[in-house]
Amino acid sequence: MSEKVIDKVELTEAVETTNFTSITSQTEPKQESEKNLKRSRPDSPFDGLKTSDDSILYETKERQMCPRCKKTVKYFCYRCFDVSGMDRSQIPTVNLPVHLDVIKHERELDGKSTAIHARVIAPEDVSIYTWKNAPTYEHPERTLLLFPGPDAKTLAEIPRDSFDRVVVIDGTWSQANAIARDTPSLQNLRKVTIAPRITHFWRFQQMSENHLATIEAIYYLYHEYCQTYETPEGYDGRYDNLMFYYKFFYDLIQDKYRQTKKTFTHRHKQNYIKYAENKPKDQKADDVETVTDKNVPEETDAQKNVETVKKQ
């Protein structure tokens, strides 16, 4: 049996194959159809987030030419980090308390990198470098590296006034290992880790569900930053918009497969798509359309950042 797959697509291209109007009635008024869709949507893991209204993303139907690089893109340009098909004021902006550097492996496709979401949402506080262009840190003692290890500490164990920059590696786990091991400027950085959490990434991975997508790891790092240093009485949602695009893509994929009654890739974890019955419809593999696993890393991009020191 053969599967129909969306072959060799990058993240944004894979997601944009889902046309919102194809999930709802073509004749139904837009506002009413969106209400009906949300009403029929099972509970989402992101329901508790205080993210901005993403209606403008659903209204974006066509790819647009990026004015800088001239590539046709949708939602945002993953090369220039500019929004596409809408005004920048329609997309939320997050101000981060500590600057974030992302060091991206060259073999990690731009369109598959969720770290780019952070760069688009927090343009003043996020920098992205390819591995070969990784910066040299003048004050490595004041820079943290989000990476597991026997010497990794939680933010609760690190004084707030002892750092002013955080580095995150973007790539598969094997790529991240290589970057952490072979990059001289990272060797003397203190390691920080975050609490274990479950990923909701739509790409198949062979690692455990505690291996997060890069944007998930980034979000939870700043979530814990807020809890540790800013609002110890409880997190108030101030960094939730870091998940603005990630939540949208998750909901878009869920809606597509739920409304079309198709089964998601069998390689992904069971019940990833939240069907109303909480189980996929019986369907022959020949009739299944899945997001391709081809060219998808064996592990997702922020991988072991969720493991605590005790698990090492």
Image: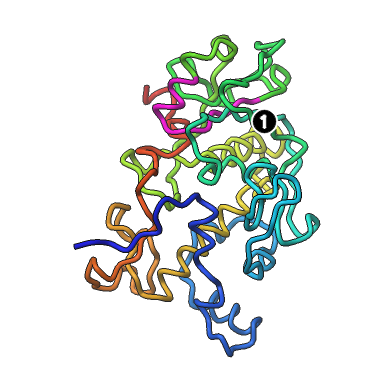
Residue found 32% across the figure and 63% down from its top: 4
Coloring basis for residues = rainbow
- Counting from the top left corner in percent of width and height, residue 171 is at 48, 33
The residue furthest front is 70
Q: Relative to 294, does residue 169 appear above or below in the rendering?
A: above
Quarter occupied by the N terminus: bottom left
The answer to which image quadrant residue 296 occupies is top left
For this view, does 241 lie left or right of residue 46? right
Left or right of residue 182, residue 261 in this image: left
Disc 1: CA contacts within 10 A as few (<14), some (14-19) or many (>=20): many
Residue found farthest to the left: 1
**Residue at left offset 40%, top offset 59%:** 6
Q: In the rendered structure, does residue 92 fall within the stretch colored magenta?
A: no
Q: Quadrant of residue 128?
A: top right
What amino acid type is highlighted by mark number 1?
A: Leu
The picture quadrant where one finds residue 46 is: bottom right
Residue 179: x and y in percent read 49, 21
Quadrant the C terminus occupies: top left
The residue pinned by badge 1 equals 100
Q: Which residues are magenta?
A: 166-179
